[in-house]
Each structure stands twice: as structure tokens, then as C-alpha cells.
Image (spheres, helix red, strand yellow):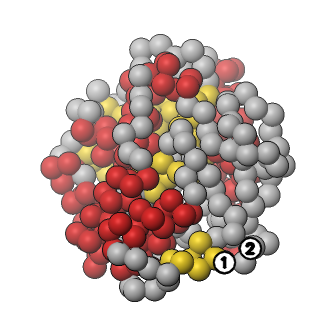
Amino acid sequence: MTTIVFGAAGFVGVNIVRQLLLDGEEVIMADVFEPDKLVWDFLPNQGQGAKFVFVDTRNRTQVRDAVGALDIDRAVIAAALTPLTLDTERDRFLEAVDVNLVGTVNALDAVRAAGVGRIVFISSETVYGHHDEMTPVTEDISRGKSFSLYDITKYAGEALCLRYAEIHGLDLVSARLCAPYGPMERDNGSRPVTSLPALLVREAREGRPLRLPAQEIPDRAHVFDVAAAVSALLFAQELSHRTYNVGAGRPVTGDDIAAAVQKIYGERPVERLPVDPQSRLLHGVLVTDRLEADTGWRPQFDIDSGVAQYADWVEACQHRINRP
């Protein structure tokens, strides 16, 4: 069986490709960025079983022609631009709308025309918006206020996918990811901001103080766990819901991450950064009961083992990683 992954050269996308190959799937890697040697070396058996196809999801005709020429059974739509700062919002506003909204619908329309089965849309915890109380978040919680372009496009992109699937009778589910971290996290043109674990590992390696933000994202999952969850949703025989949270299932603070980094690199001074007016707390941790009940998935990494695995990967290929 063959799965097409849109956004396959990106951080989350390439980890999904890796997991699918480990699961014995053939994979079409669809992206505007051709995978470099770091990507192929990261994949099992240097990507045996995977094939790259140039696809620009912003171009409706091109994506439909490219997908129409393929024999595919399932699809993962992970192509996205993540303008998480005010400066990148200003600079790439229209591009983010094109990729995250127009591109998403174009990819969905193309795989529908190709007659695929299960489709997983890679959504985000940002669809929930801002909540003042840090209580655990289920899939049915009411939506709070959005504070960024990325939040808005992920919410709208998911809504478009769900409606499109409803009117066309598609087997589509949305995976709402918490903030992932782990191998292959780098700026390849679509992800200009890296995670706190990645930043702290870099600071520790360079002998600098570990800088912790005043406001923190409470839920972080190792990207291997995220990819395994997407695979579980893709292959599940029956699913009872349209939306699923994917997270670590437990709160992780900046101090927890700093402690995990110090276990590897030794004691480092910790600095507390002032409140960033561009940042905000979103909500509490994502409740993953629905995902666990319907697929049997469970996270395998806690923050200590997750940071350790990521640090091992960095040490093995640091000279080949593009710095953000």
C-alpha cells in the first residue's frame, strides 16, 4: 500500500515518512523542497521505499496532475508554513494563507480525485485558541481567541477539510498536534522558529546560559510519538471521531526541559526572559484519551528520554543541520 505525504520534507512530515516506512508502507514524498542528504540518511535504509515527487500545493493544476499520475491508497496533508512571530507574519502573510489554506484544499481535492481511502490532516493545538485557565483540553472544548495568523489558518484549514470531507463522503480525520520537538527540527524555509528543547540543547552545547521564556507552551511531545500517532490514525480499521488530540498527556515546564538538558550537558546557569508581548499561553495539556481508546497509541517518550534522544541525534549530525 502507498501513502502520499504532502509536506514530506518538513520537520513533522519527514518524521511521518520515517514512521510509515518502518511500518512497511510505500511512501510518496510530495513537497516543493527536494529532500537533501540529511533527510535520506535519516530515513530507514536511506529512504528505500520512498519516492520524491515535486508538488506545489498552491498550484491547483500542478498538484492535481502530479497526484493523478500516482497510484496511492492513503494521504497525509502536512504541508504548512509556520509564521510564529510578528515579523514573519508581516513578511509572509499571503504566502501562509496560500500554503495553509489554498494549498490544503488543493491537496485534498487532488487526493479525492485520485480515489484515496483514509486521509489525515495535520492540524494543531492552536485551533483551540487562548484559554485563561490552564485546564486539560479535550477535543470538544469551546474555541478561544486567536492571537496569530498561524492559529487562524490552522483552524480555518481544519474546518475546510472537515466540511469538504463531509460533502464528498471522504474518510478524513484531523490530528491536532501539540508542540513537537525532536530530530530533523530545522529551518528549511517553512519553519523559522524552533522548539524550546531544540533551543536549550543548542545553548548548552555552546556553553551559554539556558534562557527560559516567561510564558510557556505546557504540552510538548517527541516527534517520534507524534508520527506514531499519525500512523495509528492512518491505519486504524474504524475511527469514532473526526478530530483527535496528539500530545504527551502531561504538562512539561521550561524548568523540566532545562533539567533534562542539564542531565546531558551538565549544570548551566538559567536565565528567565521577560514577558514577550508576541507570545501567549494557549491552554492546558491536550487530553489524548480519544486517540488512545480508538487506536491503542501511547506516547513512548517522557521529557528526559525525549531530550536525550534528540541530543544524541544533534551530536551525530550537528555539522549538517541548518541553524535557525
Residue shown at 31%/37% (left/top)?
Answer: 20
Using the image as rendered, state which of residue 289 and residue 100 is in the foreground: 289
Residue 14 appears in the rendering:
no
Where residue 294 sits: x, y (%)? 49, 18
- Left or right: 289 with respect to 136? left
Q: Bin the neighbour count of mark 2 within 10 Å (Cα to Cα): few under 14, some 14-19, many 20 and up.
A: few
Residue 242 appears in the rendering:
yes
Where residue 313 sits: x, y (%)? 28, 63
Q: Single out the residue that lies furthest toward the bottom.
A: 207
Residue shown at 22%/69% (left/top)?
Answer: 316
Q: CA distance from mark 1 to mark 2?
A: 8 Å
**Rendered position, 304 above or below 157:** below
Residue kind at label 2, given as amino acid type? Asp
Q: Quadrant of residue 137?
A: top right
Q: Mark 2 = which residue?
A: 276
Residue kind at label 1, given as amino acid type? Leu
Residue shown at 68%/44% (left/top)?
Answer: 284
- Left or right: 41 with respect to 148? left
Where residue 120 sits: x, y (%)? 51, 33
Q: Quadrant of residue 299?
A: top left
Q: Single out the residue that lies furthest toward the front.
A: 267
**Rendered position, 60 above or below 239:** below
Residue 273 — which label?
Answer: 1
In contact (CB < 8 Å): disc 1 and disc 2: yes
- Left or right: 49 with respect to 20? left
Where residue 192 sits: x, y (%)? 55, 70
Q: Single out the residue that lies furthest toward the left.
A: 45
Residue shown at 46%/27% (left/top)?
Answer: 233
